[in-house]
Every structure is written in structure tokens, then in C-alpha cells.
Amino acid sequence: MLKRVVFSFFLYMSIVVASAQTTYHDAMKLNDSGRYPEAARAFAALQSTAKAKGDIMLYMDCLLSEGEACYMLDWSEEMARIITEAKRILCDNAAIIGDSVRYSWKEAVAKLEGSYNYCMSDADTTAFARARECYQNCFLLIDSLQQVSMSDDAHMRVTVERELLNLYYKQKEYENALEMADRVCSYYDDNGTEKEITDAHATRAMVLARLNMFDAAMEDIEVGGNDVEIMRRKGKILMMQQDYDGTDNLKEAKRCYEKYLNWKKKELRGNIASMSETEREQYWLSVYNFLSDCYRLGCYAPDMLYDLSLFCKGYLLECARNNNTAHYKWQDVRNALKAGECAVEFIQYKGKNDEDYIAALVLNKQCRKPQFVNIGSVAAITSYKLAGGYTVKEAIATDNAAMKDALYSDSAFFAKIWSDDLIAATNGCNAFYFAADGFLHQMAIEYMMRGTAIDCHRLSSTRLLVNRKKGKTGRLLLCGGVDYNADTAPISTYNDILGYNSLKKGPVYINNLPGTANEVDSIYSLRNGTSHRPDTLLKGADVTDENFCRLAANNYPMVHISTHGYFVGRQNVTDLRPAVADRSLSLSGLMMAGAGKNLNDNSFNPAMPDGLLTAKEIAGVDFSKVGLMVLSACQTGQGYVTADGVYGIQRALKLSGVNAIIVSLWSVDDEATTDFMIRFYNELEKENANAPDIHKAFNRARRDMMLNGKMEVKRFDAASLTTKKKTKSVNKPRYTNAFILIDAL
């Protein structure tokens, strides 16, 4: 629910002109309906109108309302800017505004500052104390306003109480959270709508359950009756009680989850055609906790869980280009499997005591229903010690080459993922199709298979098996040797401003990658020396984001780009306050010509193309004619891990319609990457021209690199002061396992 900024509206309405007031109310309607990104933009635009008219009241109102929308989106950087600007307005206008307005503004700023610190608490534990102090200060200001105006700002008071409730809950200070929940319920019981009363009691029920007061929790949750929105929380409370005292609540919990899931399916089916990508993004992030809770049913309901996984993983990727996508069931996948094939949906979820677990839902041709295979605790798996004393968690998070080698050379660790139970459940299959989840998105687990005879495919979702589609090959667009300091002349006027601002923190140095020019030159020579395809080669200042998008969308079945990739971001979620939207489509991308120059130009207009091709911009281009996109760049497989996949470049490419993609999981070595890519395209040339198998070509190239991984490189010899040819070994996992292939059926 919107945490609305409350001002002295009687004063505000006497000042604001009717047309501006209507626009403000339109923005508030966007907020009230949960369309926070659009609301934030509307409030920001209205501030310009207020400035032009000299209307300080409207300007401040919209500024703080924008801040509240940004809070719902966890946009902390924008919140920090808004708080600074609001404090300036307060200071500059202290002498001309009345006490009531001044205290109202101070309340709103204190509330927003507390919310900002709440958002920062994942990265900074001291932010909890600062948030609490801001909220307590807000209570003092409310009391001061009451003395000045003889009226109690009750709505702001309960809003702050709700924020303190969220803060205490996140800190696991459940006794303090219950005190706030009691106050919130008391207020809404007397003043709230039916939905506000229901939500308040459902929140209180969650707090009571955390205190193991399950009878009282069930009384509160029943206030919502059979409201489907309450079903998720009721199911979770039942599971928490089972963990606590052993009460068998599985049947009732399943009933709650099924009701909620069926409603969600119906809701999405009815609205998917009219939803924007932002709204679809919000939709999945808002139900993320439900998915995790539901997966806890485990072996009690593997059929329902497989259907749930098919419903969420990759569903929106298909809906982006096909609004009539069916709600497939596990039987559809089983029927689509061929002899010797197996399908696996990995799932990560919260188990007892909120500990993360990983499991697998397994299907083969003979299954009467899916099998649920528990793999184990994520903490136990990721704390496993590798050679050199590194943990798996450390090895996943780093680009350190030695740690990558250790991770992908430890057969004992492989057995923790591909456990005996999981291998047994595959029933001797020789072709394995899997969809990752959770931390498995960050590892190339297909290279950890126990048994080289198994052909392993990574998919966005095993639902893709129902309508198999091979990626087309043919003309190739090659981009590399990018000049990051080029002076480019923009053609269009659109740019992802948030993406630009996320990297402009000060002086930025982007080193050129001369090896990428050699890479694309070598591939171009290889292909055009063996055939007469009209391939296109873009280099230097020509590799602009505009040129790339225009050409890649123009009937190129294959696209290859070699450049810098990046991802920056974080996420802030609890089961009381699920993530509403995510910015990683703006916080991940590819660096194109002019990126360095534009980032270091303080006079640059961020509304113009900037040389940063963000995932958000990629998602807005129609790449449906591209059968294969190869991103020969660092970290292009990274992003926020969500129920619907990894929010980053790989998701953007799937949203844009690309059939199959090759991306990297860590920073890659230029020379080794060139060697691998030449091997890959060489293998692709050997494939049937009418129906080339990208997956086979990719695997053959990788295996050849593992077996014959030597290449000639030029190195400066200090003794002779000349450049000499040297032999470099590139058969280590740091080189051979960096790239993964997704959705190549």
C-alpha cells in the first residue's frame, strides 16, 4: 500500500491551480494502483511545472511523493537526492511558510529519511539504528504539529508505525513489531477500509506466528475470510506451526496455496495483454515469497510444484512476444520428452527457520508424476571448502582464476549438486534438460555433471520442450574493438537515464580491449574464407548502441558482440515487504562506442544515447529474428536472481525475442575467449547448413578446448627486446567454463 505523504491539504488546495491539482491526483492514482515507476516519473514531471509557476507547495508535495514512490521501488539513490533537495527547500523557505506547513514537511522528510535507511540496511547494519531514530523523530514532529495546529496527523502517525513494524520485523525484533502491529490494527479497525483492516490483521498474524503464538495468529488471519490475498500468509503460518510443534498442516497449507495460485493464474491470464513490462516485472517480484513458501510442500505436492515452476520460470519471457501463451502443466512436458530424455526444474526456497534450500523436480518419460529430490541446504553447499581453503560461496562471487579452477575441478563438490538421489531419479537418461534457480544461476552446473555421456541443456524453463524451436543461423553481425572514447553523433533522442546515472559516480576509466578487435577479425576471416555469406563487421567508433540495435534487428540470424559487460545492484526484501520492482535491467548492460567519453563529460545530456546499452534498452528492441546472440563480454550472465529468471542482460535478450544466447558468468580472458569463439564458429561451420545444431557445436568447441587447449600468443621478451610467439594453455576451467549456452534446443 502507498505510504502517502500527508500535508496540510486544505492549505495546499487553496493554492494549487485546478489543472495542476488534477495532474497531481492522476499521479496519486498511479501510486494507489501500485504503478510506482510511472507515478515517480509523473511526480518528477509535475515538479517542473511547479517550478515554472513558482508554486513551492506543489513542488514540495510532488518531490516528497516522488520520494515515497521511489521507496516502494527501493530506489535509494533517488531517495537520497530527494531528501537533500527537500531539506534545502525547508531551509530556504523557513521564513515564509507557517508552522503547520513547516512541521508537515519536516514529518514527511523524517519519514522518508527513515525509509531511505531501511532500504540501506541490507548493505549497512548501522542503518537500522538511523532508520529507527528518524521514525522516532517523526513521532516527535507529529506531536509538535498537534500542539501548533490542535489536530493530530493520525494518518502519518499510523504510516510511521507501519514502517517501524517493517523495520522491527526485518531485524527479528518481533516483540517490538507486535507493539506496532497492535497500534496499526487499532487505528484501521476504527478508521480503515475493509482491505486496510484485512491487511493490518494479516500482518499482525505474521508477527504473532514469528512469536509462536499460532492460535492468536490464526484468529487474526481469519479476519480476511477467504480473501485470496490472505491465502499465502495463512499457508505460511500453517507451515511455520508445523515446523514448531509438528502439527500436520500440509493438507490445509496446500489448499491455501492452490487457491492463491489458481487465482494468480487467472489474474495474470486476464491482464497479461494490457500489462507493461514494468508491471509484469512488478508482478513476479511481488509474489516471489509465495513461490518460496509453496515450494516447501516438497514431496507432498511435487505435481503442483512442477506446475508452479512452469507457471513462473520464463513465463513472462514468452508472454512478451505471445500474449496467448498457455498455462502448461507437467504432463505437457512429460509428453514432449523423447526416449532417453529427462527434464529437471531446480527450485530454491525458504525452509525451516528461514534457511535456504535447493531441490529438484524431476520428470522422465515413464514418470507417473514428478519426483521431488531434496539436494540440501544452500548454506551447507556453499560453505563447502575447496582446494586452497576457499568456500564455494567465495568461488562463485569472485573472478579469481584459481578459485574458478578449484570450483570446477572438485568432483566431491559435483556430487553435492548432482547427488546420488538426483542421478537415480533421472533413471539412466542420456539427455538432460534443466532450468536453474537461486544460486545455481551463478554456476555452470552443466559442466559438473557426473558422467560425460550425458548431454546437458540449460533452459529458461523446461516448458520450452513443449514447442521446441531451433535457433536459426546464417548472416552474422560482428562487433568488436570498440572505441570507448569516440566522439559519437547520436541519431535518436531516447536513453536509459537511470542506467547512465548508475555508473556516473565520478571519473570513469574504461580500458580499450584490443583483443576483441582480433577476435572479430578472426571470426570474420574464418567465416568469409569458407563461404560467401554477407556478414557485417562493425569496429571502433561505429559500434554505437544505435547502430548495434538497428543492424541486429535487421534480419541477422546471428549476432556476436565483444566488449565490456557490467552489472551493479542489490535487492531489499522481507516477507512483509516483498520487492515491488527491480532496477537491474537498468543496472546491467554492454559498453559501446563513446561510453567513456560521455560518462566523463559533466555537460553530457543523459537523455541522449550515451554508449551504454543497458538491458532495459535491449529489452525494448525487437530481436525476434536473431536465432543466436553471442555476448563475448564479462558478467553478461549476471543479474538479480528472481522467480522468473535472472534480471539482467540475459533476461533482456529473451524479452527482445532472441532464441538462444551465449553469455559469461565471470570476467573473461581476451586471448582464451578468442580461441574459444574461433573453435565454436569453426564447429558451427561443420554443422548441417539447413538445420545446424548450435548446442552440439558449442559442446564440441568446449571439449576440444579442454583436450587441445593450446594457442600461440605474442609476448614481449625482455632478454631480446623483441616480441616472440609463446604457447599459452587455455584448457583450465577458468577458460573453458566461463561461457554458458541457454535455450539452444
Image (cartoon, helix red, strand yellow):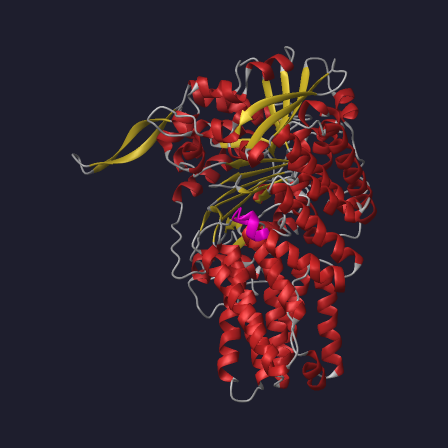
The residue sitting at the bottom extreme is 96
Which residue occupies the foreground of this view, 583 or 298? 298
Q: Give the percent coordinates (x, y) of residue 464.
A: 71, 30
The reply to whether residue 488 is in sight is no
Q: How many marks?
A: 0
Q: Give the percent coordinates (x, y) of residue 282.
A: 67, 50
Which residue occupies the foreground of this view, 497 or 445? 445
Asked if residue 472 lies in the magenta stretch, the reply is no
Q: Quadrant of the C terminus?
A: top right
The main secondary structure of the magenta stretch is: helix
Which residue occupies the foreground of this view, 567 or 601? 567
Q: Give the percent coordinates (x, y) of residue 36.
A: 67, 60
Q: Quadrant of the N terminus?
A: bottom right
The reply to whether residue 46 is in sight is yes
Q: Which residues are magenta?
A: 170-177
Q: What residue appears at the point 49 percent right and 20 percent down from the top-left corner?
A: 414
Asked if residue 171 lies in the magenta stretch, the reply is yes
**In this picture, is 421 found above or below 156?**
above
The residue sitting at the top extreme is 428
Q: Give the percent coordinates (x, y) of residue 164.
A: 57, 58
